[in-house]
Image: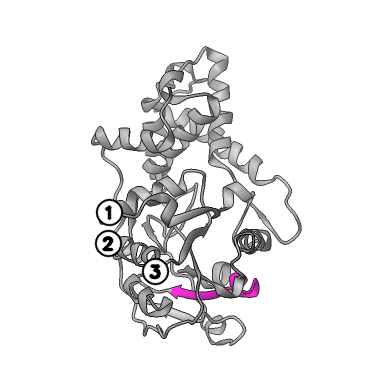
Amino acid sequence: MSLSLAEYADFLDGRKLIWPKVPVAKAVNANPSIKPLPGIRAVLWDVYGTLLRVSDGKFTLFPDEEARLQIALDKTIHEFNMWNHMYRKPGPPWQSMIGIYRSTIERQAMQASAKGNVTEVNLVDTWRALIGKLFEKEYTYDEGQYGDLDEFSEKVAFFFHSCLQATEARAGAAEAMSDLSAAGITQGLLSDGQSFTLIQTLKAVATQGDLPPLYELFRPQTIIVSADVGVKKPSKMLFAEAVQQLRSIGIPAAETLHISCRLSTDLVPAKAAGMKTALMVAEKSGLEVSSDVLKDPATRPDRLLTELSQLRSIAGV
């Protein structure tokens, strides 16, 4: 039987590979606002930049430094033995792949979505398309380990992104999630991300300490990730999906708290959808805030955190 994505992630850990590191945080001066918000029954985390520290401050397929994209492609080509099955050009392996990678993503990003929404690229679909070209030159892989093409493409996408963007759990993440779970507060993700985002999150947070079992932390209805919905923040459709999913398990938007380090793209539409909001101001990287939006009663967040331990006061746990 092939490895699940979680088993594959454990397998990579066992190989002691060298992964990129998140740059040291640059502090931000801010005064927290952490008075209890009565009646919170669910917390929806933004992942990249909020619950997890990440290179570039947010999820991206094109990092600030193109050299990182080149390195990630090169490592992926070698990891999965793609080089001899590519239409090769003179130069290093990544040079033969990067143009196809870019054009594939650009084509996927142009797919139509409803008015007012922004199409999200599914990185698994990107790699499925790239792998498909390799089959033209008799490419094979170990199906016993990696599974069918869809499963293999997801594992390749996970490996590639792990090489592309460094991630680590924000200080206090494991304790905050455990406290919420112990208090019976439902948790979930409302985030730009991919099918591997949940595994990536759990792996990173677990390095800080033991977490409750997955079924105690999250429910299937509370994992709302952009690649699954097909649109990314600030698309109204993504937030409407979150509200609908929570309603299906008996939790109204007004009893839901969305936490993010991005105000205009994340918390403003969450507030418009009826949720309570909390702005995470822990470091400069990833922080997106406007003084005008912050001052406007219609858009300003309900609370402001400077560290995750303050969530205990806000949620009353």
Count all numbered tags in the image, as a single digit. 3
Residue 46 image position (x, y, % from top left)? 48, 62
Residue type pointed to by label 2: Val
Asked if the residue under mark 3 is in contact with the one under mark 2, i.e. CB atoms within 8 Å, the reply is no
The magenta span reads 269-279
Residue type pointed to by label 3: Ala
Residue 91 image position (x, y, % from top left)? 41, 26
Image vertical order of residue 307 relative to residue 201, above or below: below
Gap in Å between the C-alphas at discs 2 and 3?
32 Å
Residue 24: numbered disc: 2
- Residue at (59%, 70%) from the top-left corner? 270
Image vertical order of residue 118 relative to residue 275, above or below: above
- Residue 28 lies in magenta, yes or no? no
| Residue beneath disc 3 | 183
> Which secondary structure lies at badge 3?
loop
Image vertical order of residue 246 relative to residue 86, above or below: below
